[in-house]
Amino acid sequence: MTDALPQSVRAQLDDPFTELSGSLATARHLDLAVVESLRLSPTFQQVVLTSPDLDGFSYNPGQDVMLLVAADGRRPVRRRYTIRSFDPAARALTVIAVLHGDGPGERWISSAAPGDRIAGIGPRGKITTLPGADWHLFLGDESAMAAILHMAEALPGDADASLIIEVPDPDDEQELLAPARTRLTWLHRIGGRAGDPALLAAEAAEVDLPPGDGHAYVFGEASVVLALREILTGRGLRQDQISAKSYWGRGRANAGHGEPAKDS
């Protein structure tokens, strides 16, 4: 049983999130322990976390928790993981992480074992489902899979949703348990480069956009998100019909707060 970052080290950090305010005013500090760590596929690791701090915890589908995975000198290094599910009775919060390299988040996720402890902050994130939309379109790569599946599963039974998710390999496909009327398309890169817009762009250009006031949710690599947004607006969607979020940037490490680093 180990701490991701010992309390003695955490106490010495110059932490901008010691006090939670602004967009984090409704979030809380969470002292979390690992219950289970399971490799779902070559690309995905599932981790179940628990804590007494999760009593009364609530969140919107698509929100995440920010975990303190390491330190860079006196600077905290956090990574954000979308909440896949939460069992209030068991105080069990499940996240699914993408295994893609050797970053600080992956090092912790890959080695996490029952009993290990980690500090978190959550829930956070602004984008969630709009249940009143006439239809829903979700587009994203593997970094957004947990968010897309959970958001679609939260839609009511009379909703219509199309999900298009790019993953590296067919083994990375996961089950969708949604009461809504859904059409799920998996795109397999099969050795292709992550962050190449070709597969998702082709789908965005051809996918059916039904009549009515629908909403599109676009997630993934920063330049791909921008390209998809341009395609959808070119097809007639208004800006307020698109919720877009960059989860990562190709060739750029995420910043210490877990967001894609800005270009210098």
Image (cartoon, grey):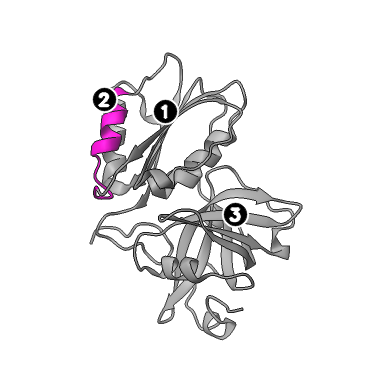
126 is higher (above) or lower (below) than 109: above
- Does the magenta segment cover residue 160? no
From the viewer's perspective, is 216 left or right of 131? left
Calculate the distance from the C-alpha at mark 2 to the C-alpha at mark 1.
13 Å
Q: In terms of image quadrants, where is residue 2? A: bottom right
Indicate the position of residue 6 as horizontal and vertical percent values. Answer: 56, 82
Q: Residue at x 70, y 59 (%)?
A: 54
Indicate the position of residue 163 as horizontal and vertical percent values. Answer: 44, 32
In terms of secondary structure, what is the magenta stretch mainly?
Answer: helix
Q: Residue at x 25, y 41 (%)?
A: 197
**Residue 89 got which mark?**
none
Q: The N terminus lies in which quarter of the figure?
A: bottom right
What segment carries the magenta color? 192-206
Calculate the distance from the C-alpha at mark 1 to the C-alpha at mark 3.
29 Å
Indicate which disc, 3 or 2, sits on the residue closer to the N terminus: 3
Please state which amino acid type lies under the numbered disc 2: Gly
Q: Closer to the observer: label 3 or label 2?
A: 3
> Label 2 neighbourhood size at 10 Å, few (<14), some (14-19), many (20+)?
few
Calculate the distance from the C-alpha at mark 3 to the C-alpha at mark 2.
37 Å
**Residue 234 got which mark?**
2
Q: Does residue 20 appear anywhere in the picture?
A: no
Q: Which residue matches tag 1? A: 241
Residue nearest the viewer, comparing 138 with 107: 107
Indicate which disc, 1 or 3, sits on the residue closer to the N terminus: 3
> Label 1 neighbourhood size at 10 Å, few (<14), some (14-19), many (20+)?
some
> Label 3 neighbourhood size at 10 Å, few (<14), some (14-19), many (20+)?
many
Indicate the position of residue 145 as horizontal and vertical percent values. Answer: 45, 44
Q: Residue at x 57, y 65 (%)?
A: 120
Q: Which residue matches tag 3? A: 94
Q: Secondary structure at mark 3?
A: strand
Q: The C terminus lies in which quarter of the figure?
A: bottom left
